[in-house]
Image (tube, rainbow, N blue to C red):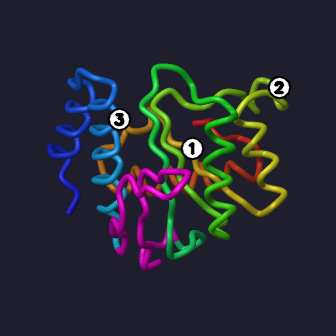
């Protein structure tokens, strides 16, 4: 059961991490805690290493959580606790991981968001353009940033965020609050 104090403790652990590796590990732990609090979601792998790539989180989605019904049973999650927005190459890499596994919906959690911006007319620049292009293939990537994480106080907040970001993909408003 979601516990706000536990969640806020995870946020504090992210902020207190001293090294780059610790910052990444604490960020993944935060994301894992939050997502696995949703009904029917279980962690199946963390930092799953394959021959040429790593997947931060692999989730099982029993599809009992209404907001995750558009997602497949397997959900890939990428966690980037970077000090700057994530660029197109990293997002393209994540989408390629999804594509190789025939997955259509994933979650990309980037502390400082991603580059590019639909809302300000910057339609063909950065990671946002990768997301827009992948929609043509039926691939959908939900973007969550640190500001979003800081504003979550309940699972309903997370559910509403996922709904807003999922629907926003189709009208090119990924970050419109």
Does residue 99 sit above or below 111 in this rendering? below
Give the number of the disc on residue 104: none
- Chain-order first, disc 2 or disc 3: 3
- Helix or strand or loop: what does disc 1 sit on? strand
- Mark toward the start of the polypeptide (1 vs 2): 2
Q: Position of residue 175 (x, y in %)?
A: 61, 36
Q: Is residue 58 magenta?
A: yes
SS for dot 3 = helix
Closer to the camera in the image, 62 or 160 = 62
Mark 1 — residue? 143
Q: CA distance from mark 1 to mark 2?
A: 19 Å
Q: Is residue 47 magenta?
A: yes
Q: Nearer the viewer, mark 1 or mark 2?
A: 1
Q: x, y percentage for residue 82?
A: 46, 26
Residue at which label 2 appears: 121
Q: Are marks 3 and 1 in contact (CB under 8 Å)?
A: no
Q: Quadrant of the C terminus?
A: top right
Look at discs 2 and 3 and give the one toward the viewer: 3
**Residue at (53% x, 51% y) in the render:** 53
Residue drawn at the location 53% of the way across and 52% of the way down: 107
Left or right position of 106 against 17 = right
Residue pointed to by mark 3: 24
Pointer 2 local density, CA inside 10 Å: few below 14, some 14–19, many at least 20:
few
The mark that comes first in sequence, 3 or 1, is 3
Seen at 30% across and 39% down, the residue is 25
Image location (x, y in percent) of residue 128: 72, 36
- Label 2: state its secondary structure: loop
Give, as a single range, the part of the protein colored magenta: 40-68
């Amino acid at each position: 059961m979601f516990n706000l104090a536990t969640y806020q403790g995870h946020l504090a652990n992210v902020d207190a991490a001293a090294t780059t590796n610790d910052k990444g590990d604490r960020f993944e732990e935060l994301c894992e805690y939050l997502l696995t609090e949703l009904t029917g979601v279980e962690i199946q792998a963390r930092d799953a290493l394959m021959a040429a790539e790593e997947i931060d989180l692999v989730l099982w989605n029993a599809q009992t959580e209404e907001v995750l019904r558009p997602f497949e049973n397997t959900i890939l999650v990428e966690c980037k606790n970077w000090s700057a927005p994530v660029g197109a190459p990293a997002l393209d890499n994540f989408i390629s991981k999804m594509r190789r596994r025939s997955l259509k919906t994933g979650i990309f959690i980037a502390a400082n968001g991603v580059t590019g911006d639909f809302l300000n007319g910057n339609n063909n620049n950065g990671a946002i353009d990768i997301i827009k292009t992948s929609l043509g293939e039926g691939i959908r990537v939900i973007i969550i940033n640190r500001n979003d994480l800081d504003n979550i106080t309940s699972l309903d907040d997370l559910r509403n965020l996922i709904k807003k970001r999922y629907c926003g993909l189709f009208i090119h408003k990924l970050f419109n609050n």
